[in-house]
Image (tube, helix red, strand yellow):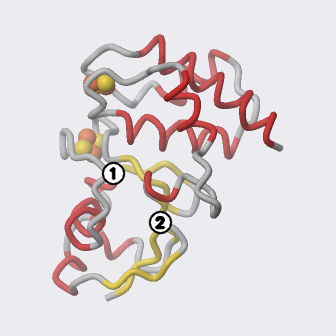
Amino acid sequence: MKLKINGQEVEIDDAYGSGLLIWAIRDGAGLMGTKFGCGAGICGSCTVHIDGEAVRSCITPVQNVVDADIRTLEGLPNEDGMLHPVQQAFIEQQVPQCAWCMSGQMMSAAALLEQNENPTQEEIVEAMSENYCRCGCYFRIKSAVARAAEIKQEMA
Ligand code: FES
Ligand code: FES
């Protein structure tokens, strides 16, 4: 079967078609940027974009997304390889500690900035509130999302 991931048709084994999206992405397509955490739709570490919306891949059946545009962390840089403003900001602000949650954090932040180019602090907190960080990097995450919005506007 094929899935459209990061703008490309990706061939994956049919066996993944009856399972959950995270395993089709990681094991089927070999894209390891998407992380498994709780496996129950709670922590947000497995967040990817489905047609531009932040979605938890650990509870998303592959059958629901066969015709969708799937975007993973590997698809955040632009076609020239330039890092996404969210990635630039997370590096600039030295956000990660263990980094396990960071793929999901960046995917949620990128989805927010697609929908709201200039979010307020309250809107950032609200949008990021369902992405958990065991290392407690919340202050730096919030700061980096605000910085990413600035970088995105500078690049426009
Ligand atoms: S691993 Fe998917 S929400 Fe936690
Ligand atoms: S940086 Fe460790 S879980 Fe977030």
Q: Secondary structure at mark 2?
A: strand
Question: Whole-percent x and y of residue 91?
Answer: 50, 29
State the residue at coordinates (50%, 67%).
Answer: 6
Decide if residue 89 is on the left or right side of residue 135: right
**Amino acid of disc 1:** Gly
Instruction: Kindly identify which numbered label has been placed on residue 70.
Output: 2
Label 1 sits on residue: 33
Classify residue 22 as left or right of residue 53. Answer: left
Is residue 131 positioned above or below 41 on the image?
above
Q: CA distance from mark 2 to mark 1?
A: 13 Å
Vertical position of residue 115 compared to residue 57: above or below: above
- State which tag comes first along the sequence, 2 or 1: 1
Determine the secondary structure under disc 1.
loop
Identified by mark 2, the residue type is Ile
Whole-percent x, y for residue 48 in the image: 42, 53
Using the image as rendered, state which of residue 156 and residue 3 is in the foreground: 156
Q: Are marks 2 and 1 in contact (CB under 8 Å)?
A: no
